[in-house]
Image (tube, grey):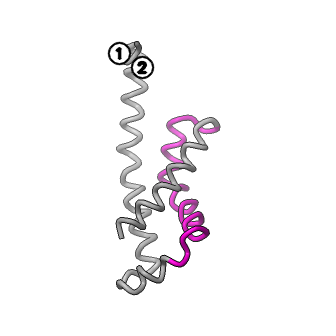
């Protein structure tokens, strides 16, 4: 199941990175938490559709995998948001400048 989460999250992070110029860092974290999982799932379905059968044979339904991945990404998003906030504040104070 971790491989499924890793693959979906990889595509979600790519989508969030692409959204940085349009939404900014805070918006990219929100995009990752809310829209990243569906976009990652679309990409996973396109590139790795045959792997769903392996998870089904292990007893994981597609719905279970998707809901679990979405829940984890949604819970990780506030931590990422806090991390971005702290980094931007440190840059603003000059603590991270060379």
Q: Which mark is residue 91?
A: 2
Q: Which residue is mark 1?
A: 95
- Of residue 59 and residue 23, the one placed in the foreground of this image is 59
Q: Quadrant of residue 91?
A: top left
**Residue 36 magenta:** yes
- Of residue 57 and residue 72, the one placed in the foreground of this image is 57
Residue 76 as seen in the image, left or right of residue 25: left
SS assignment at label 1: loop
Q: Give the alpha-carbon distance from disc 2 to disc 1, as whole Å.
A: 6 Å
- Of residue 51 and residue 21, the one placed in the foreground of this image is 51
Residue 28 as seen in the image, left or right of residue 79: right
The picture places residue 46, in percent across and down from the top left corner, at 61, 69
Highlighted magenta segment, given as a residue range = 22-50
* Image quarter of the N terminus: bottom left
Cβ atoms under marks 2 and 1 closer than 8 Å: yes
The picture places residue 47, in percent across and down from the top left corner, at 58, 67
The picture places residue 7, in percent across and down from the top left corner, at 46, 61
Q: Quadrant of residue 73?
A: bottom left
The picture places residue 12, in percent across and down from the top left corner, at 51, 54
- Of residue 88 and residue 59, the one placed in the foreground of this image is 59
Residue at x-position 53% and y-position 78%: 50
């Amino acid at each position: 199941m971790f491989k499924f989460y890793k693959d979906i999250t990889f595509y979600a992070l790519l989508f969030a990175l692409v959204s940085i110029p349009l939404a900014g860092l805070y918006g990219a974290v929100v995009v990752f938490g809310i829209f990243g999982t569906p976009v990652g799932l679309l990409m996973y379905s396109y590139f790795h559709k045959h792997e769903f059968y392996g998870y089904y044979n292990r007893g994981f339904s597609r719905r279970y995998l998707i809901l679990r991945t979405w829940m984890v990404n949604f819970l990780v998003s506030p931590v990422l948001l806090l991390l971005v906030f702290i980094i931007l504040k440190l840059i603003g104070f000059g603590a991270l400048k060379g």
